[in-house]
Image (spheres, helix red, strand yellow):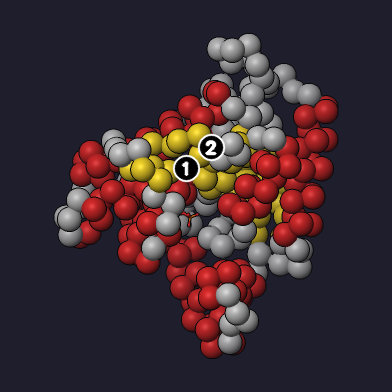
Amino acid sequence: MSPDASGAARIVIAIDGPAASGKSSTAQWVASVLGFRHVDSGALYRAATAAAVRSGAAPAEWTEDLVLRVAANVTLSPRSTSFAPCIEGVDVESEIRGAEVTRHVSRVAQMPRVRTWVNSLVQQAATRHDIVVDGRDMGTTVFPKATLKVFLIADPWERARRRLTQQIGRRPTEAEIAEETDRLVHRDAQDATQTVQAKDAVLIDTTYLTQPEQVERIVALAKAVTQRGSDTSPVDDHAS
Ligand code: DC
């Protein structure tokens, strides 16, 4: 780790993995246990998509220039253990989880200059705080020197079951899980190019783990790595 402008060394824990692998909720929990801030990089792709939806232009007409222009109103506002995605300074957390944003976000996330914009916002957050960041390419493209890299996977059926249980607040039927599994594997295919496991990432299959167990493992890994110390900087030398 190298010092930042304030003289403090910053720690970056990068958690990547496919949709509904539990990355964001696990990252949030790990951040609060360690006293770090959580950054959800997917929330920035979603906020840019929500801003494009608000522009009123038909999604088929969205160009990279249009998305970047409306994304200029998107910011990450620091909270005690996280950053809230905002449009024009207003928290849009619930808007970005809606069906319309979810339908179009993969296409927005494939726009190279939008990726550069997201990466730079996330990297800026890491110059001021120790962070736990989750996404698809945090350990490969954005923080190739992250203090700790974790890649979370889980069986698609189990990911679908967890996501539905959270969304509908009851036990889903087999037919509902099957439909959601179908949606998830299609999203996995759309996001496959960006979703890359770093060679030095710790792979954790959460299919048979509870969330507290996942959190415990990542916290233990983080403690082991930070106690060992490192000469390398998680915030220097990253590609944009
Ligand atoms: O994790 P999520 O469902 O909130 O991600 C939203 C979209 O953004 C999804 O299509 C994957 C994409 N994404 C990405 O390409 N790279 C990231 N670092 C994070 C998300």
For mark 1, give the secondary structure: strand
Quarter of image, res 235: top right
In the rendered image, residue 70, in percent from the top left (x then y), is placed at: 25, 42
Q: Quadrant of the C terminus?
A: top left
x 35%, y 59%: residue:
101
Q: Which dot marks residue 135?
A: none
Quarter of image, res 130: top right
In the rendered image, residue 187, in percent from the top left (x then y), is placed at: 45, 65
Residue 198 visible at all: no
In the rendered image, residue 167, in percent from the top left (x then y), is placed at: 53, 71
Q: Quadrant of the N terminus?
A: top right
Quarter of image, res 80: top right
Disc 2 and disc 1: Cα gap in Å? 7 Å
Is residue 32 toward the left or the right of residue 220 in the image?
A: left
Three-letter residue code for mark 1:
Ala
Judging by the rendered image, the residue that carries numbered circle 2 is 79
Judging by the rendered image, the residue that carries numbered circle 1 is 84
Q: Is mark 2 within 8 Å of ligand 1?
A: no
In this rendered view, identify the residue nearer to me: 104 or 93: 93
x 62%, y 70%: residue:
162
For mark 2, give the secondary structure: loop
In the rendered image, residue 151, in percent from the top left (x then y), is placed at: 65, 50
x 56%, y 81%: residue:
177
Mark 1 crowd level (few <14, some 14–19, many ≥20, 10 Å Cα): many
Q: Is residue 71 above or below residue 216?
A: above
In this rendered view, identify the residue nearer to me: 202 or 50: 50
Three-letter residue code for mark 2:
Arg
Q: Is mark 1 within 8 Å of ligand 1?
A: no
Mark 2 crowd level (few <14, some 14–19, many ≥20, 10 Å Cα): few
- Circle 2/circle 1 CB separation < 8 Å: yes
Residue 85 visible at all: yes
